[in-house]
Image (cartoon, helix red, strand yellow):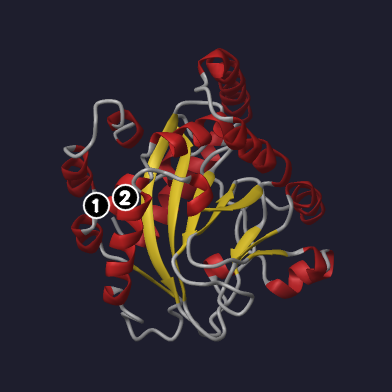
Amino acid sequence: MSVLVKKLRNRILRNVYKVSFLLNQAERDYQAALEQHFARLPVISTADWNLVEAIKREGVVVTSLEALCIPSTEQMFAAAKNLMPKLPKGSSGDNNEYVVHASSEQMMEYPEIFLWGLEQRLLNIAENYIGLPVAYHGAYFRRDIANQVERKSRLWHIDVEDRKILKAIVYLNDINEDYGPFQYISKSLTSKIANSLGYKQGYIQEKRMQNVLSPSHWKSCTGSAGTVVFADTGNVFHRGKIPIYGDRIAIFYDYTSRQPRYPFYCKSSLPGEDLLLMADKLSEQQKPYVLWR
């Protein structure tokens, strides 16, 4: 299916989902599901509960691989370091190119990267934040190129796939203000700005955002290699700041509920055939997170 056809299909489906009686019923079903699942939420440590509460308040929290202390981190990080030099610095020759992703073949060569996102501690954090059984959409290994291209994820936006979306962003190189940090606007300010702009979806240019909110309120998530940013990209304005002096290399781990607001926007980081091959490496407990459809 071509990109144009997919966009047209998604627009039509989104408009169907907006029909008032369907929307109201979907919201009632969602609230009922939250209430029903509340007693089944996994028990988490005080430290992880503090993470969840911080995301609820601010929309974003910054921690580290060291602080999370997840068993397979050493294998994941070693695999990521091995993959980094194999990631092209550019692929298409397109002057508008701003990001390069690892191919599915490369991700299958280093399954430790994908599998890290299925560590139970991460899944439990995601489930306690989202409030429902979690769908894991995989790992996106990406190089954001140091150039002046300002488009798509480098523009301010809010993701629309679900009511709550959790991304765990792992920096693989040291990121300061000049290396393209993840930037966001706090949850409370996002709500006010979205209302004042009549924002529903899409991208907002930097100049337009400056007109409604001083850049002093734009928050950058900086840190050394191994920094982890948890962000609800469905409830905060966010973007990747344009890298100036060097590329940003990071892995994005994506989670939603298994009954997302717009399921047709949800996709896995791996094609179906690779996803099934990866499923062979999973426990029976892990498979529903990946094969949730």
Taking 120 as reference, is 36 above or below it? above
| Mark 2 residue element | helix
- The image quadrant of residue 19 is top right
197 left or right of 272 in image: right
Q: Residues within 10 Å of mark 1 (few under 14, many from 20)?
A: some
Disc 1, disc 2: CB below 8 Å?
yes
Residue at position x 61%, y 31% in the image: 46
| Quadrant of the rendering where the N terminus is positioned | bottom left
124 left or right of 29 in image: left
- Residue 191 numbered mark, or none: none
Residue 220 x %, y %: 67, 65
The residue nearer to you, when weighing 270 against 22, is 270
Q: Amino acid at mark 1?
A: Pro
Residue at position x 60%, y 64% in the image: 239
Q: Is residue 270 visible?
A: no
The residue nearer to you, when weighing 81 against 142, is 81
Residue 146 x %, y %: 50, 82
Taking 98 as reference, is 225 above or below it? above
281 left or right of 147 in image: left
Residue at position x 40%, y 66% in the image: 142
Q: Amino acid at mark 2?
A: Phe
- Residue 114 numbered mark, or none: 2
- The image quadrant of residue 156 is bottom right
Residue under pointer 1: 111
